[in-house]
Amino acid sequence: MRLSNTLIAIILACCTMPAVAKGVSNSDRTKATQGSIDCLLDDAWTCLNAGNCKKAIEDCNNAIRINPKDASVYCMRATGYSITHQWQKASDDCNKALLLDPSSADAYNSRAQLYGHMRQYDKAIADCGKAMALDPESSQAYAIRAQCYIFTHQYKKALEDCNKAISLDATISQTYGVRAQVHGMLHEYGLALADCNKEVSMNGATAQTYCVQALAYLNLQDCNKALEDCNQAISMDAGFAQPYGVRAQVYLKTGQNDQALDDANKAISIDPGDPWAYAIRAKVHNAKGQYQEALADCDKALSIDPKIAEAEVEKAEAYKGLPTQMIKNLLKWPGSQ
């Protein structure tokens, strides 16, 4: 089952992809400007990780006024633009950074983040490869690529990249969150919960952490804990689509189909580009005997992601239910007994 978008969503999404590395030196800096720029970058880094992208972008703007030839500042600002969905500005900054410093692994990582947010996963994976070629010790490149492998259903490759990222830098809590997602995809729910606990112990829980835990508990048949974690995720970030999709499944499993449909609709309204949300709503429609609606949602999900297995499963279920529905409709025609 697909998780964050987002990341995408956060991501992404409560943004599980690590931010750009701070303090990258640039040959065009002078001693007079070094301290000022580093101070602004440090503050921008802090603001990005606190979710204050507006302030981070302002800090980068000020740094660029001091030295418009510092590639690392454009990398940092591109991350802020990506998180706030200012795609063209993020793209311009990534390309500017690469123009100033073609050997910058951070610039490729920033552009990979951008492509990830835009669901252009093949391009993101390619840029991660370029970053790794320039800096084989870039844990960030492996973590970003792991996210992209999740969204392209390459879970074993994602796990390999997570393990590599952690071996390079075990202090980045988000990487454990990414690995928890992978374990969930591989049905290794105990390991997923263990990595969630590791992330929480290092840096506290995020809405994404609670979503991963909720899915694990749901698959372990503990609907009460799954519902608690969904509610906690929503209380932390009501604009994050994924917990509504997970909660829809919890409601569905406990026979609360109307509430499940409400949550599936909410997930789609927040992120209409998420195929997983349509697959979940298709499942709800099937449970309610609304097979035509289920088919429409499956087709929508598969048009976004042709490899999403959940949509294929629900599509088959809808086709099996259609004859029964059609017979019932015929019996309701005027003149029928």
Image (spheres, rainbow, N blue to C red):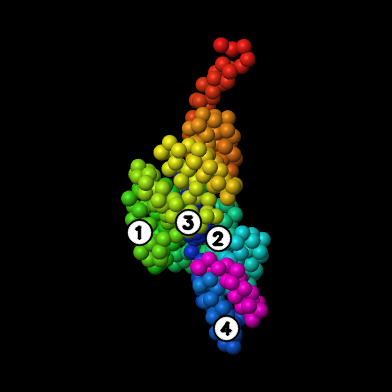
Q: Residues within 10 Å of mark 4 (few under 14, many from 20)?
A: some
Disc 4 marks which residue?
Answer: 36
- Label 3–label 2 contact, CB within 8 A: no
Start-end of magenta stretch: 48-70
Query: Element at badge 1?
Result: helix
Disc 3 marks which residue?
Answer: 235
Q: Residues within 10 Å of mark 3 (few under 14, many from 20)?
A: few
Q: Position of residue 114 (x, y in %)?
A: 58, 60
Image depth: mark 3 or mark 2 in front? 3
Image depth: mark 1 or mark 2 in front? 1
In which quadrant of the rendered view does residue 85 lie? bottom right
Image depth: mark 3 or mark 4 in front? 3
Dominant SS of magenta comes to helix
Sequence-wise, which precedes: disc 1 or disc 2?
Answer: 2
The answer, for residue 98, to whether it is visible in the render is: no
Sequence-wise, which precedes: disc 4 or disc 1?
Answer: 4
